[in-house]
Image (cartoon, helix red, strand yellow):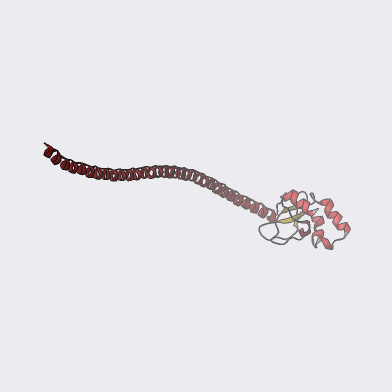
Amino acid sequence: MLASNIKVELGLVVSPRRVTLMPGATAMYAWQVEPHLAHLFTKQIIRHGVGACQEISSNLGGAIKAIHSPASPCPLPLLRPAAGTDEITRCEVDVAAAVAAETVDLRNELQFLQDHCRGLGHTMAVAKQTSCILQERVRQVEVKNQFQDMCMDQLEGTLNTVMRTIELLRQTDAECKSLQYYTGEHNLAVDQQAKSVVPSNAAEY
């Protein structure tokens, strides 16, 4: 019941087992109580009887209400001014000031986080653009390498063809020289035979 009132009044979630009628200085909540119920907040709830617990429960949200813990120490529980007066307690003023200061701090922190997120967004956009540029460069290098490989293959094929042609020319040259040598030898033999035949014919005349 007390935890529910803290959540409704302050928006804070506190485990029911950790809620106390006498919160310490580090607690984020305090209790605002009508004077006639102040005696209920002089000891912890586990020391109260069933009747006292029922009285606290029936007055939650009205005579008993959770408020933000004041920035400066002040007696607990906080008592409302007597009926018919407009006096505001010092603690209530301190609480309002603390809440306002915390709100400003939270807004500043939120603004910082928003700016930081925008900066991260810009950085991510630049990184994405840079990544696209690098990918395009890699693609161009790959295309260039493929073209170079193709040219090397063609050059290697041309070189092999030239080498085969040179080898054929060498073989042809060798064959020509061999043929010339054979032809020269044959002509020499024919000449010698012709010379040996001519004298015999002349003697007959």
Foreground of the two, 200 or 112: 200
Q: Determine if residue 85 is in view.
A: no
**On screen, residue 91 above or below 115:** below
**With 181 as the anchor, is 144 left or right in this view?**
right
- The residue lying furthest to the front in this view is 204
Q: Please name whichever residue, 3 or 38, is drawn nearer the observer in this view of the structure.
A: 3
Question: Whole-percent x and y of residue 151?
Answer: 39, 42
For residue 96, side relative to residue 167 (left or right): right
**Residue 54 falls in which quadrant of the image?**
bottom right
Residue at the spot 14% in from the left edge and 38% down from the top edge:
201
Residue in the foreground of this view, choosing between 126 and 60:
126
In x, y percent, where is residue 152?
A: 39, 45
| Residue 160 image point, x, y percent | 37, 45
The total number of labels drawn is 0
User: In the rendered image, is residue 145 in sight?
Assistant: yes
Between 125 and 36, the one nearer to me in the picture: 125
Q: Quadrant of residue 163?
A: top left
100 sits left or right of 54 in the view: left
Q: Quadrant of the C terminus?
A: top left
| Residue drawn where x is 33% and y is 45% of the image | 167
Q: In the image, what residue occupies the spot 78% across and 59% down? A: 17
x and y percent of residue 24 in the render?
Answer: 72, 62
Q: Residue at x 79, y 54 (%)?
A: 2
